Amino acid sequence: MFLRPLRSWALRTLRRQGPGIPALGPGPRGVQRRIWPPDKENEKEKKLVVCVEGNIASGKTTCLEFFANTTDIEVLPEPVPKWRNVRGHNPLGLMYLDACRWGLTLQTYVQLTMLDRHTHPQTSPVRLMERSIHSARYIFVENLYRSGKMPEVDYVVLSEWFDWIVRNIDVSVDLIVYLQTTPETCYQRLKMRCREEEKVIPLEYLAAIHDLYEEWLIKGGLFPIGAPVLVIEADHDMQKMLELFEQNRDRILTPENRKRGP
């Protein structure tokens, strides 16, 4: 039910660009990727996009809140309220209750809403995003498929949509901040914050998500990594995490420091 709105949105967006062929830019592993929207010739400075990635309850929201009041930073949290209420329906809650039935429904809408996040006009020099369209595909869709809860046809359809988006729309990022935690730490935090949909999440699910993040961002080779990765160990208490965020402020927000990597 969500594929048609996504297709219509994409077609309308591309038509608004007017005649001509969009500029081409380097994609993952040498694949040419269309850049959308096209760069403005008079743009003085490239705006930067930083994605904060990590398991459920790894501290992503805390990280975004820490930097939210920094000058020239805009913060985009995950659009979880949208996933909880689509015209009165809660696909997030339904997916946790019955992933086999509702996995495609949720992940189609996640892909749409994350695409909206990536393409939302950026008003500040640095954008800090909670997760990305890339982790939606490489972590959560992949987990549904590997765990046997998503049929191959659903997996292929979502993958086709994702591949089309990456080829035709600029959803690139400049840095990935990976908050690395153990599944056990996330599970304890999950129980403490008591979000309704998360009450049914078992430790095994968090372990599977953790393993996929490690495959993608640490071991490499699972899927393309389109940006440098800054790893922050995030098993610590709140005070220690705030100290680590402050220690890594320049590496996260300053371009020249970011280029040197961790």
Image (cartoon, rainbow, N blue to C red):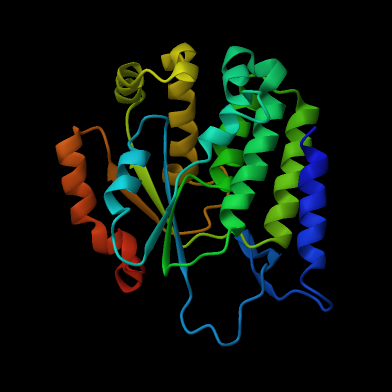
- The relative height of residue 112 versus residue 149 in the rendered view (above or below) is below
**Residue 37's quadrant in the figure?**
bottom right
At 78% from the left and 64% from the top, the residue drawn is 14
Left or right: residue 166 versus residue 143 is: right
Task: Tell me if residue 261 can be seen.
Answer: no
Task: Tell me if residue 46 can be seen.
Answer: yes
Left or right: residue 191 versus residue 32 is: left
Closer-to-camera residue (156/18): 18
- The relative height of residue 153 versus residue 45 in the rendered view (above or below) is above
**Residue 150's quadrant in the figure?**
top right
Please state, as top left, top right, bottom left or bottom right, where the N terminus lies in the image: top right
**Percent position (x, y) of residue 261?**
33, 62
Q: How many marks?
A: 0
**Residue 70's quadrant in the figure?**
bottom left
- The relative height of residue 159 versus residue 48 in the rendered view (above or below) is above
Residue closest to the far front:
88
**Percent position (x, y) of residue 128?**
41, 55
At 72% from the left and 50% from the top, the residue drawn is 163
At 51% from the left and 65% from the top, the residue drawn is 122
**Percent position (x, y) of residue 131?**
48, 44
Closer-to-camera residue (216/235): 235
Left or right: residue 244 versus residue 93 is: left
Please state, as top left, top right, bottom left or bottom right, where the C terminus lies in the image: bottom left
- The relative height of residue 175 versus residue 23 in the rendered view (above or below) is above
